[in-house]
Image (tube, rainbow, N blue to C red):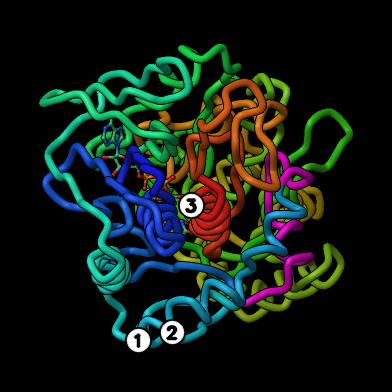
């Protein structure tokens, strides 16, 4: 019987330990927190969007870094396999908007409970409150040095996560283990995070816009253009659209990025102009601010008028044709400068990590050190929101566990 040490009891570590134990190995899962899956617990706003009900091809379209590396693995353990796996263990699932899959109970904790039960059934040892300090290879075996003891094992799977939300235990320890074995770690950047903007959006702080379009440009190249939800915050912008943009601009100097917000994506410029003229005709004796109330929330009117260079108390009757044109432009092409992304600690995911060129995608084993495996966010893999990041953890964890 071979012995396997799995370091980190998050999504990747739990599934890796399940499959390593299922294959008849003696498995120990080491977690420094008092419980498993502390990050899983907060995923999907406590509901855990554990995967996306999509094909491997669609999955790969949603991977931002190193999709090519995942093209084989995602076929070995696909989003469908993830759903079948959890349902076979008795966890009922449901699919919501955007093909996002959640536990039917809406409880993220049920995902961890299901995996914990399976770990116990398979006889894996779960060691909580035990932090791995060092991972060493001695001859053909590994020595896992924890804050309590030294554990010998034949293989080790590093599943320590990234750097985001460090309070959940993801403090980047695995990068040090990888470097210790000569592995490269690509630059670590925040992804799926809010964007600090040059303009101060304090007047509209807390305002969420449901149907706007955000475009991100690097020079002439369009990196992102999507319609959806965006939120103004004390630092700039957040919400699904901003998070999506952050994944694509985190390696570009911020001053080279331009964001263009379209507040009325359903109307082209001509149609919007006609709509404004109609609203203004109905509110002839009023101020411009009042004449726009059917178009957008009052707080936002102030911001848009300021961008168009029009005073809110100006009478509609006194508006020039040029000013109406400026108003249309401010609504359709509101340019926003980027200062920086919010720090990695606040990001949903870490972009960058253990260089996947040095990992065999068929096994998740290091090409440098036999018996050393990596899975989950510690690897240089990241994706958009929608359940794709947990799917990365499950796919890589499954493969590592099966091969360790
Ligand atoms: C707020 C938030 C919401 C999210 N929502 C979703 C979502 O709905 N859907 C989705 O797909 N993704 C979501 N994600 C991303 C998802 O949580 C991660 O992709 C996933 O948790 C990565 O799994 P992992 O096992 O690689 O790492 P982690 O979940 O970070 O687990 C790593 C574990 O290793 C332990 N550890 C670290 N170092 C040591 C050490 N030295 N010794 C012992 N143990 C150690 C940590 O304590 C931790 O438990 C969300 C992330 C955040 C922050």
Residue stretch in magenta: 53-69
Q: Quadrant of residue 315?
A: bottom right
Say which of marks 3 and 1 sits in front: 3
Dot label at residue 106: none
Identify whether 135 is placed above or below 269.
Answer: above
Dot label at residue 90: 1
Q: Mark 1 or mark 3, which is nearer the start of the sequence?
A: 1
Compute the Cα span from label 2 to label 3. 20 Å
- Residue found 53% across the figure and 74% down from its top: 100
Q: Is 106 in the magenta?
A: no
User: 178 left or right of 92?
Assistant: right
User: 328 left or right of 243?
Assistant: right
Say which of marks 2 and 3 sits in front: 3
- Residue found 40% across the figure and 15% down from its top: 138
Identify whether 342 is placed above or below 102.
Answer: above
Q: Quadrant of residue 369?
A: top right
Could you tell me if the residues under marks 2 and 1 are in contact, i.e. CB atoms within 8 Å? yes
Q: Position of residue 268 (x, y in %)?
A: 83, 67
For mark 2, give the secondary structure: helix
Q: Position of residue 389 (x, y in %)?
A: 53, 54
Residue 77 in view (yes/no): yes
User: 298 left or right of 149?
Assistant: right
Dot label at residue 401: 3
Residue 301 in view (yes/no): no
Identify residue for label 2: 87
For mark 3, give the secondary structure: helix
For mark 1, give the secondary structure: loop
């Amino acid at each position: 019987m071979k012995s396997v040490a799995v370091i980190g009891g998050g999504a990747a570590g739990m599934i890796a330990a399940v499959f390593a134990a299922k294959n008849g190995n003696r498995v120990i899962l080491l977690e420094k927190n008092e419980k498993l899956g502390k990050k899983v617990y907060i995923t999907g706003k406590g509901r855990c969007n554990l995967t996306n009900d999509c094909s491997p091809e669609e999955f790969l379209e949603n991977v931002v870094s190193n999709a090519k590396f995942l093209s084989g693995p995602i076929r070995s353990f696909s989003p469908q396999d993830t759903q079948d796996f959890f349902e076979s263990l008795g966890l009922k699932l449901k699919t919501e908007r955007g093909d996002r899959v959640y536990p039917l109970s809406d409880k993220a904790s049920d995902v961890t409970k299901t995996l914990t039960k399976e770990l116990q059934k398979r006889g894996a040892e779960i060691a909580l409150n035990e932090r791995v300090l060092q991972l060493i290879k001695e001859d053909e075996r590994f020595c896992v040095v924890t804050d309590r003891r030294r554990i010998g094992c034949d293989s080790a799977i590093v599943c320590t996560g990234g750097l985001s939300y460090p309070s959940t235990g993801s403090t980047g320890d695995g990068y040090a283990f990888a470097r210790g074995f000569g592995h490269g770690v690509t630059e670590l950047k925040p992804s799926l995070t809010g964007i600090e903007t040059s303009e101060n959006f304090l007047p509209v702080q807390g305002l969420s816009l449901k149907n706007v379009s955000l475009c991100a440009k690097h020079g002439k190249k369009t990196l992102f253009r999507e319609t959806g939800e965006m939120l103004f915050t004390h630092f700039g912008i957040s919400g699904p659209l901003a998070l999506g943009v952050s994944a694509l601009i985190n390696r570009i100097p911020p001053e080279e990025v331009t964001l263009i917000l379209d507040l009325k994506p359903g109307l082209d410029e001509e149609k919007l102009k006609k709509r404004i003229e109609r609203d203004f005709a109905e509110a002839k004796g009023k101020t411009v601010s009042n004449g726009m109330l059917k178009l957008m929330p009052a707080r936002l009117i102030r911001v848009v008028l300021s961008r168009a260079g029009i005073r809110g108390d100006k009478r509609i009757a006194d508006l020039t044709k040029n000013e109406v044109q400026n108003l249309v432009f401010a609504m359709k092409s509101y340019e926003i400068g980027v200062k920086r992304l919010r720090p990695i600690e606040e990001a949903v995911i870490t972009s960058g990590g253990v260089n996947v060129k040095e990992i065999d995608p068929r096994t998740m084993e290091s090409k440098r050190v036999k018996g050393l495996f990596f899975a989950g966010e510690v690897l240089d893999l990241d994706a958009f929101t929608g359940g794709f990041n947990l799917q990365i953890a499950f796919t890589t964890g499954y493969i590592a566990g099966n091969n360790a």
